Image: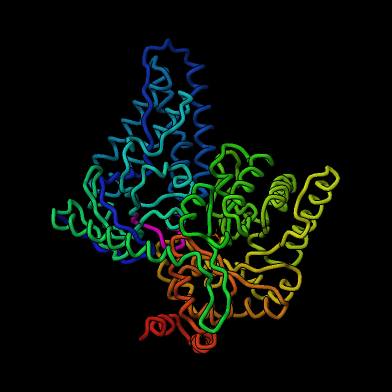
Amino acid sequence: MLKIQAAVRFTRGIVIGPAYVVKEKAIEKPVVDPSRVVDHAMEKARFERAVEEVSRDLEKLALEHDVFAAHLAIVQDPTLSEEVFAHIEAGKTAEVSVDETIEGLKLVFQVMDNAYMRERADDIEDIGNRLMAALLQKSLRRFPGLTEPSVIVARDLLPSDTANLDASLVLGFITAEGGVSSHVAIMAKNRGIPALIGVPEAISSIQTGDLVAFDAETGEIYIHPDESIQADFSRRAEALKEREEALLERASSPVVSRDGKTVRVYCNIGSLEELGAAMPYAPDGVGLFRSEFLFMDSDHFPTEEEQFEAYREASEKVGNEITIRTLDIGGDKALSYFTFDHEDNPFLGWRAIRMTLDMPDLFCTQLRAILRASAYGSLRIMFPMITSLHEFERAKALTEECKESLKEEGVAFDSNIPLGIMVETPAAVFMAEELAKAVDFFSIGTNDLTQYVLAVDRGNEKIKRMFNSFHPAVLRAIAHVIDSAHKAGIEAGMCGEMAGDLRATEILLGLGLDEFSMSAQVTPDVKDIIRGLDVSEAAEKATRVLAMNDVEEVEAYLAGG
Ligand code: PEP
Ligand code: MG
């Protein structure tokens, strides 16, 4: 039995089950038929087409992870094609030629002294599998051999991985990399899947098939737990179930502070599946529907009809207010059916509202779908990554055009549907007073806001410790946004991960936040905390925290130190 202690904790859940270790970038090798008659020119052309197809896929994947840029360079390296062509000229099919070339290349790496270089053999194998799949016109399976519910152990999981993963086969996640605002963390929270992230030892200590037990709340991981640990984990699971049941009993009662302020505690979702997982927590509403997951789960831009059905179903299921964020793609989120040009700084690039304003047909398809769904429930539209009043006004003008066309077609919609923005860029913070006069609501996106205010890439492992929403610069930005909203008579919410951080609840209430939106699993705790708080006392604490100079001081104060 081996024990590992994880430092970052953000979900709860007790898990025991077999491990499935995701081989880095592993994809299944298709079976090759070597018996075909070979026409040299035709086989070479087939190989070249496969290289083109694989290059296109890798260009998209390179947006999500640098490793795929390296794969792209290898696929396009002339020495690879020269070697494959030599095999073809010796009378072999393109498949056999790729197979033999890749095996030879792997061997070169496998015998190297340096462990890092030896691991590169996996990259070569991965590239070979992609080429083979392209030659055979087969689709690739990203999780080969995952057939029973397992603890998924991986170095990192990409948004495209998590979007494609069958949730019924996932007991929990353990990843070596990633922080609390990484996509795997957000997805795990939204689906109520226990997870531990940023545990580098996991990947070297756990093998596929090992029995693993972990407690997401305490961060303890046991590999091959003995009987007494297994019994202890069963007791913990029972106690957790009772605690959750007690919290859930109170979940649907109103959230009013001790001194009478009513606060909305909403949930964040990325799909109807996540909404299903959220429903037992009796959400008061949805403060963020990340609509990009509808786009990422599809193999084409979802049609107006497909989107309308999804938004209507979500709205009817919730039965309360639901906030649809328009497409926030780009940055680290790619689409399999759409090529983004290479960008040196994708998080500062063509993403979210920038893209949709440049593609009005795509934008209007989504806006029309949301508007149509608004006839069936209480919907709000929220625009991401706003940096100027002009951007909001253009988005609003397009919404108005869509309303006009629906009216002409005699299609019903809510003509007063609120239009709000994510406040997640420093520009929106500085322009908050002006923006507040134009929009119907604010929702603060602390994941991006923290990244942009602190100039800390939210996905960069090396500077993970610097990504902290309790930095006074971020807190002062939040305070200014809430004040600006209230001055203009609108409400301010928050849908970034900070809204579900229990250490932040009192300060945010004290700053005047009107709506907290987070993973459904956390809502009962936040509701309970708010019911026990007094807004004026919280405001005093918030004032004290706003005067602090550094993040360590803020965290020590909030920890009661
Ligand atoms: C945010 O940036 O805080 C946010 C809620 O949006 P996302 O995490 O999807 O960028
Ligand atoms: Mg964001």
Quadrant of the displayed image that contains ligand 2 = bottom right
- Indicate whether 445 appears above or below 369: below
Q: Locate residue 265, reporting x and y percent.
A: 54, 67
Q: Examine the image and state in which quarter residue 392 appears.
A: bottom right
Is 56 part of what is drawn in magenta? no
Q: Going by the image, does 394 lie left or right of 65?
A: right
Residue 281 seen in the figure: yes
Q: Residue at x 46, y 36 (%)?
A: 75
Q: Going by the image, does 302 lie left or right of 90?
A: right
Q: Locate residue 329, reporting x and y percent.
A: 59, 51
Q: Residue at x 46, y 83 (%)?
A: 550
Residues in magenta, as a range:
175-186
Q: Residue at x 74, y 48 (%)?
A: 360
Front-lying residue, 188 or 515 = 515
Front-lying residue, 500 or 251 = 251
Front-lying residue, 397 or 57 = 397
